[in-house]
Structures are given as structure tokens and as C-alpha cells.
Image (cartoon, rainbow, N blue to C red):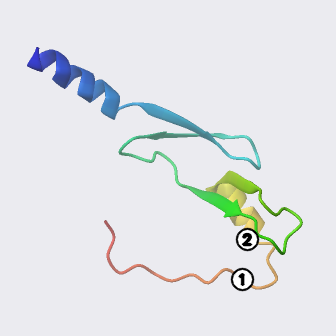
Amino acid sequence: MFKKMEAMENRMEKKVYEVYCNSCGKKIETTDSTKREDYISIKKEWGYFSNKDGQIHIFHICESCYDTWTGQFRIPVKVEEQTELL
């Protein structure tokens, strides 16, 4: 019984989640414990002073589309180096 549960837990740990870039449509594959590619995930709850009051927008952007998008900013993205990498 224990071995069956252990095998089931191992399969569950390796479950693959499919995430798609909302910009280009590219599939970004991740698992519970490992991102195979990195991406940005944005969740915005629009407030009273917007034209989208009460709406929640959620989207994902792959690294390539992020670079293209932020490359168009008039004020560049602030980049800080991390001293400890986990």
C-alpha cells in the first residue's frame, strides 16, 4: 500500500502545467517544482478610477515577448542584480 501511494505521489510531483504566452501564443511548459522556461505572470485587479472597474485581468508573457514589450518603453525597466541565487 505504501509503495502505491509513493508511486502516486511521484507522478503527481511531475504533473505538467501548460502555460501559454498571451502575446505570441507560445506554449511555456512548467512542472510543480521546475520551470523549464521563465515567464512573467501578471494579475491586475482594476479599481474604481479606471474604465475596467471590477474586472480582473490575468495574463502571461514569455521572456522573448517581455524583451520586445519592455524594449518599447520610453523609460527603461529598472534592472537590479541579485547577489544570492537560489
State the image quarter where residue 82 is shown: bottom left
Read off the residue under disc 1.
76
- Residue pictured at 68% horizontal, 53% vertical: 58
Q: Residues within 10 Å of mark 1 (few under 14, many from 20)?
A: few
Crowding at mark 2 (Cα within 10 Å: few <14, some 14-19, many 20+) = few
Q: Is residue 14 left or right of residue 77?
A: left
The image shows residue 9 at horizontal and vertical percentages of 25, 28
Q: Reply above or below: 19 against 7.
A: below
Across and down, in percent, residue 64 comes to: 67, 56
SS under mark 1: loop
**Residue at the right extreme, as displayed:** 51
Classify residue 2 by image quadrant. Answer: top left
Left or right: where 18 falls relative to 53: left
> Three-letter amino acid code at disc 2?
Thr
Q: Give the number of the disc on residue 70.
A: 2
Q: Residue at x 17, y 15 (%)?
A: 4
Amino acid beneath label 1: Pro
Report the number of numbered marks.
2
Where residue 84 appears, x then y in whole percent?
32, 76
The percent position of residue 56, horizontal first and vertical second, equals: 72, 56
The kind of secondary structure element at disc 2 is helix
Q: Residue furthest left?
A: 2
What separation in Å lies between label 1 and label 2 (alpha carbons)?
7 Å
Please identify the quarter of the rendering in which residue 68 is found. Answer: bottom right
Up the image or down, 56 lies above or below 77; here it is: above
Mark before the other along the chain sequence, 1 or 2: 2
Question: Which image quadrant: the C terminus?
Answer: bottom left
Q: For this rendering, which residue is in front, 58 or 63?
A: 58
Up/down of 65 relative to 7, above or below: below
Q: Residue at x 84, y 62 (%)?
A: 52
Quadrant where the N terminus sits is top left
Tag 1–tag 2 contact (CB < 8 Å): yes
